[in-house]
Amino acid sequence: MFEEKETINEKEQKSIGLPKTSSVSLNRESFYSWFDAQEPSDKSFLSKTADSYNTIPSVIKALKNFEPFGVSGFVADVLADNIAERKEKQLRDVLYYYCLAICEIKQKISELEIDIDRIKPHFSVLSDVYLDTGMRSYQQEKIEYIMNILVNGIVDYDRDLDEKITMFSLLDSLTISQLRAAIYVNGKFRIMKVEEIAQELGLEITYARQLCMSLNGMGLLNITDIGGIGQGSGGYEFGPTEYGKQFIDYVARS
């Protein structure tokens, strides 16, 4: 995964409108400072995101019309504030990692690793999918994985667009625990007992088994002990799948 800083040169910083730094590095603090500087003084970013109140189910907002003490209305107002604040931080993170993705892609172009003309057809579509998917994620770790899919999808000439979009959709549907289990088992390239998976991920065995069973249903893990002696229907040993390996290749840093 990306570390806290991603090295870029001054030419790249200038081309994307970021401030120059003496260490020619991009970190969250400098990015957020630049981001804040783009906001007009008469209207804060938080004010803009307050429109997120409209995403609260209408039934919740309607409760204050029937509840005489106004408690429900107060709850709705609190929810609106929390949504606005969360959306602000989330958008900052999504744009920060998008910036890192662009820097990495530009670096690959400058080093002649990829042909800019060949990545153009999918670039805008995958960028839109990245932004949409990122804004539905509430965990920074997941946004990093989404960024990796963006970079890998753009530089992968051989896969068609629908298949790349499927990678975003699949990641969007997984929890962080499911992602870690899929990455761990497929990355080891071997059959593993559920106890080993649980210990590595710091989970209870029952929960780890449940996660792995769900990943089997998605084609990301194989149940390798079905019909085994004393195992009943199986589900105590899991191994990688070709689709699982393909998926983690996309969520891993390119």
Image (spheres, rainbow, N blue to C red):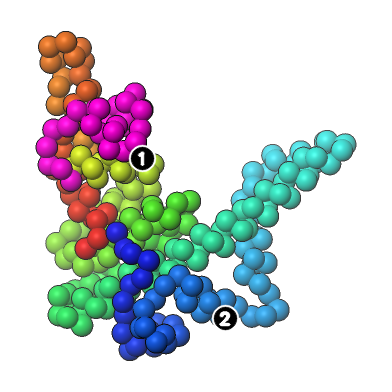
Q: Can the viewer see residue 252 in this picture?
A: yes
Depth order, front residue of 178/64:
178
Numbered label attached to residue 177: 1
Tell me the amino acid under the disc marked 2.
Ala
Picture quadrant where residue 25 is located: bottom left
Residue that label 2 marks: 37
Mark 1: give few (<14), some (14-19) or many (20+) Cα within 10 Å: some
User: Quarter holding the N terminus?
Assistant: bottom left
| Residue 199: % across, % down | 28, 33
Q: Residue at x 68, y 75 (%)?
A: 43
Q: Residue at x 51, y 79 (%)?
A: 34
Q: Can the viewer see residue 116 in this picture?
A: no
Mark 2 secondary-structure assignment? helix
Please report the bounds of the magenta region as a residue range: 187-215
Query: Does the magenta run of residues contain 224?
Result: no
Which secondary structure dominates the residues rendered in magenta?
A: helix
Q: Is 32 above or below relative to 110?
A: above
Q: Is 23 above or below relative to 80?
A: below
Q: Residue at x 32, y 30 (%)?
A: 208
